[in-house]
Amino acid sequence: MIRCMRGPAEATTVTSIAMTAPDLEQSSSCAAELASLQPGTPISRELALRLIRCGDDVLPALLSAARAAKENFKPGVITYSRKVFIPLTNLCRDYCGYCTFRRDPGQPGAHTMTPEEVLAVARAGQTLGCTEALFSLGDKPELLFPEMRETLRHLGYRSTLHYLEAMCELVLRETSLLPHPNPGLLSAEWITRLAAVSPSMGLMLETTSSDLLAPGAAHDNAPDKVPAKRLRTIVEAGKQQVPFTTGLLIGIGETLEDRVDTLIAIRALHQRYGHIQEVIVQNFRAKAAIPMAHAPEPSHGEMLRAVAVARLLMPNVNIQAPPNLNAPYYEELLDAGINDWGGISPLTPDYINPEKPWPHLEQLRVRTQTKGFQLRQRLPIYPEFLPRLNSRSGLLAEKLHAARNHNGLARETRAA
């Protein structure tokens, strides 16, 4: 059962109180177009805009079309990556209105991990069958904070990116885990350097709307969240054929049209370069200690619509949504066309959303099976992108070969 309405507040968000004649005509038109869709054929921007606004009467047809598109793409299976979350540093020069991860030097919880701490987490994850070391960190904090420059000098590195590169190489050399860095904006040179020590990397586009850079908006005082800059990084990764994870963040002040346009921008980059291995649809969650503490969260219905539209816009791309941010009904995202749960850790919390614990892997398996799918563990790089790395040699190639099974998924050492 799809729970599209869980209270009065959501009722006004998700659907109209009364359907007018034009509403009914548009619903009928949307339903007819959904019925005529061919799985595997991307929908137009115009249809996406209508569907993301659809009423509850059309929602079942939308979800049915999205699930059919997913099954046409990767039938019967839902994947996840068993990971450790390594918050290399939470110092950051960006002040986003929704973030509890970042810190200024001297604030409680401000921390830059030492190599010993990084290696200890990676080794502990290895014993639990993890195959991914997800590196998350603030964007170039040394450009704003002299304290970070001093920390880097003490560690023996010129920049946060130099330190990240060394820690990816350390994990690659000393453990069986594969690094997946999310370091923020990157130059062409740094994409090349990090690609030598990681099979994939990521940067959330979040939104193409520059309106969120306005004073008081979510990206006010966040110089690295300028959409054009983030698009430039994704383009450069495409030019270098680096398997890349990106996505949108919904509920941070953008419009429904902005959500569609962000997905369209990602689709256009993938059509040009073919390197988008995964699109994440992530929902904003309010927290007490952020400027957006009282901002409304996206409703469950909004999330289902955004995921389903993402699937129909990109029917042959991996679509992921985080289960911990969509509890307790996260399994209903499977009806909207996702084929992946993203990174799940048996060891480390979600440092970006620490109040939202990962589901236990056995619970995730049961809920996935209840929806008719088998749960499978993957690597941080998806199987279809492994051929891009066949020309690689050296340590990264050796570790990839050791970690993969005959299907290109993770060689599981423990039951998921």
Image (cartoon, rainbow, N blue to C red):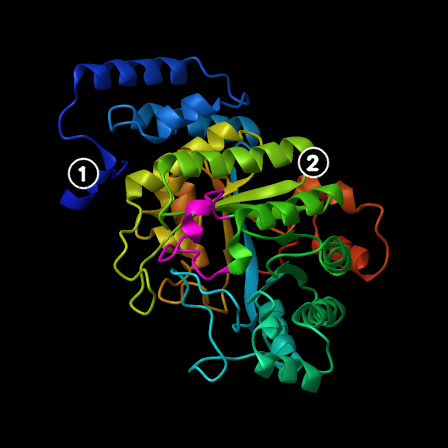
Label 2, label 1: how far apart the Cα atoms are: 40 Å
Secondary structure beneath dot 1 equals helix
Q: Position of residue 352 (x, y in %)?
A: 45, 64
- Residue, disc 2: 273
Secondary structure beneath dot 2 equals helix
Dividing the picture into quarters, in which one does residue 402 lie? bottom right
Instruction: Find the residue positioned furthest to the front.
Output: 215
- Left or right side of 15 for 39: right
The answer to whether residue 4 is magenta is no
Q: Determine whether 211 is above or below 2 in the image.
A: below
For the stretch drawn in magenta, what is the main secondary structure? loop
- Left or right side of 61 for 205: right
Q: Position of residue 165 (x, y in %)?
A: 72, 67
Q: Position of residue 166 (x, y in %)?
A: 73, 71
Q: Quadrant of the N terminus?
A: top left
The answer to whether residue 221 is magenta is yes
Callout 2 touching callout 1 (CB < 8 Å): no
Residue drawn at 74 percent across, 68 percent down: 169
Q: Position of residue 250 (x, y in %)?
A: 39, 46
Q: Which residues are magenta?
A: 206-222
- CA neighbours of label 1 inside 10 A, class few (<14), some (14 to 19), many (20+): few
Front one among 402 and 308: 308
Q: Looking at numbered disc 1 in the image, what kind of residue is underneath it?
A: Thr
- Left or right side of 232 for 371: left
Q: Which mark is residue 315?
A: none
- Residue, disc 1: 12
